[in-house]
Image: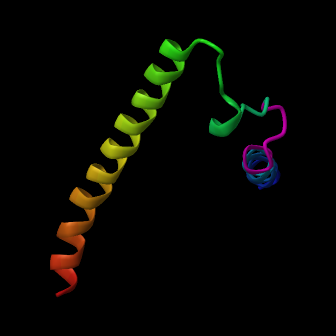
Amino acid sequence: METKKSRKQQKQEKKGQRQSGVGAAPGPKVADVRTEDQTIQAALDNMLQVIKGSFEDLKRDNLEPLQKAVE
């Protein structure tokens, strides 16, 4: 019984660390990622737009079946 309790505590502690970001290096925000090279900046902006578009497509594709199921 004692082993299970300590495992449960360890699991909760790990979960808390992941949620609080302990030990994780904070990454730069999208607005902070800028470069002087206009070609590179244009490519980064383009990639960001592609990623956002793909995310919106995935969100829409996954949302439609759920909406149909509710109706």
Q: State the image coordinates of residue 28 (x, y, percent, origin top left).
A: 72, 32
Q: State the image coordinates of residue 4 (x, y, percent, origin top left).
A: 73, 51
Which residue appears at 79% of the width and 29% of the height?
25
- Say if 31 sits above or below 66 in the image: above
- Say if 70 sits above or below 39 in the image: below
Q: Which residues are magenta?
A: 17-24
Which residue appears at 40% of the width and 44% of the height?
52
Which residue appears at 72% of the width and 31% of the height?
27
Q: Quadrant of the C terminus?
A: bottom left
Along the viewing direction, whichever of 33 and 8 lies nearer the viewer: 33
Along the viewing direction, whichever of 67 and 15 lies nearer the viewer: 67
Q: State the image coordinates of residue 56 (x, y, percent, origin top left).
A: 33, 53
Q: Is residue 42 left or right of residue 34?
A: left
Along the viewing direction, whichever of 57 and 46 lies nearer the viewer: 46
Residue 1: quadrant of the picture: bottom right
Answer whether residue 20 is magenta in the image. Answer: yes
